Amino acid sequence: MSSWLKKKSNALELYTIDVILGRRADTGAAVYGAFLQVMSYLFSGLAQLRFWLYRHRILHDQPLGCLVVVVGNLTVGGTGKTPVVEKFARALQERGRKVAILSRGYKSKAPPVWMKWWWALTHADEPPPRIVSDGKNVLLDSEQSGDEPYMLARNLPGVVVLVDKNRVKSGAYAIKRFACDTLVLDDGFQYLPLKGQLNLLLVDKTNPFGNGHLLPRGILREPIKHLRRASYVFLTKSNGERDHELEALIQKYNPGVDVIESAHRPKYLQRFGSDERQPLSFLKDRRVVAFCGIATPESFEKFLRDLGAKIVGRERYLDHYRYGKEDFAELSELARREDAACLITTEKDAVRIPEDQLWERPIYYLRLEIEILHGAADFDEAVSRICFPQVGSRPPVMG
């Protein structure tokens, strides 16, 4: 994609986000919003039809004969899912499970067309899933695997990470090739061909369901009433204060469901391309340039301000934005112009920066980890239900 076309595409996507979030109030935004609403009705109808077909067994899920846990959400982007998947997979591994994480590899670079044709001509079966980690080594970079699978593979030695849109196929591969006994579906709440024994639904407490509309008018992938499909609800980005309205809504659609409340906590700063780590106090009164390409840049910037950083310049990019040389040049110029001591980004952004990229000023990424605030016993119970399944446990509800 040319630089001009890339910028135009990014501008349209940012404009769409502004319309969805109500940041635009002009006539053009109203017309565009009405168009998105019509498309949202169409999307809702198709989504409901799909659930109906699976619920009435017209379309069938495909059991693989091992334990399957689903981690996902009702909305697109921004729930802080990757640290939760990491925490869950590590807890399972520590209890003796052989874990494989199955991801669709969102925005990963697909193999070239000629390679697909060559495989089709020379093999009778489908190509195997891409192996991001075999449990011993990380075998693909973030461009080939996607940001989240690469981060999980790097942070979870001993855990197998596979990428394929067909997660029934990748699950069967994990069992056969790596003798895995537990499959974790990353962002798998809407993946119906492989049913989970345990559905862990993430809800961003700061913005649970957006404006309440389905895509593309809102951020919902399926109706709010589908909270009932969750075995556990995992509230993320909590400040520790109770939200009685949100709790009542969850209990309305899923009475008695256990709610686990968590927060993303900054742990340290890791220098890009180096083993150097800095404590969080490093940011106190330090002039920094902040940049990120994530769904909720406000939360990242708030972390920095709360830690005492002086954000003298910032750049926000689209979620999963793939940086180019011109972006690095602009960021370096911004840091130079504002006399920033360093540049700060997120861990997810850091995996999209080439390791041979040179910087005039040091660049660090902020390492976040999940802390359970309430429902720690419920989290341990969820892990125990996977490791030591009980006969007669409540199955997930479909649709």
Image (spheres, rainbow, N blue to C red):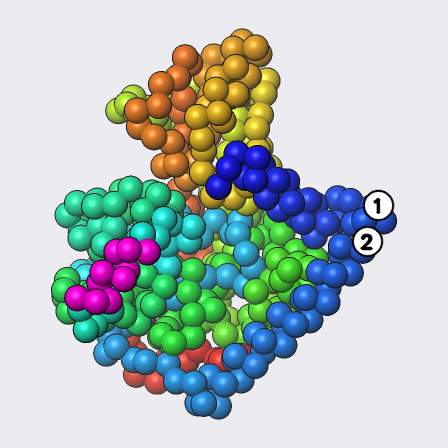
Residue that numbered label 2 is attached to: 30
Give the structural element (helix, strand or loop) at label 2. Answer: helix
Confirm whether the magenta stretch covers residue 118.
Answer: yes
Residue 27: x and y in percent read 85, 49
- Left or right: where does residue 130 sit relative to residue 360? left
Residue 390, image quadrant: bottom left
Residue 378, image quadrant: bottom left
Residue 232: x and y in percent read 46, 67
* 119 or 251, nearer to the observer: 119
Confirm whether the magenta stretch covers residue 263.
Answer: no
Asked if the residues shown at circle 2 and circle 1 are in contact, with their CB atoms under 8 angstroms apart, the answer is yes
Residue 335: x and y in percent read 52, 15
Residue 369, image quadrant: top left
Amino acid type, label 2: Ala
Q: Residue at x 74, y 61 (%)?
A: 35
Q: Is residue 336 visible?
A: yes
- Left or right: where does residue 244 sit relative to residue 333? right
Q: Residue at x 56, y 53 (%)?
A: 204
Q: Residue at x 26, y 56 (%)?
A: 115
Q: How many marks?
A: 2
The span from disc 2 to disc 1 (Cα, nearest Å) is 6 Å
Q: Which mark is residue 386?
A: none
Residue that numbered label 1 is attached to: 26
Q: Counting other residues with Cα less than 10 Å from the Cα at mark 2, is it few (<14), some (14-19), or many (20 or more)?
A: some
Amino acid type, label 1: Asp
Give the magenta part as a residue range: 113-122
Say if 299 sits above or below 382 in the image. Answer: above
* 6 or 73, nearer to the observer: 6
Q: Is residue 155 visible?
A: no
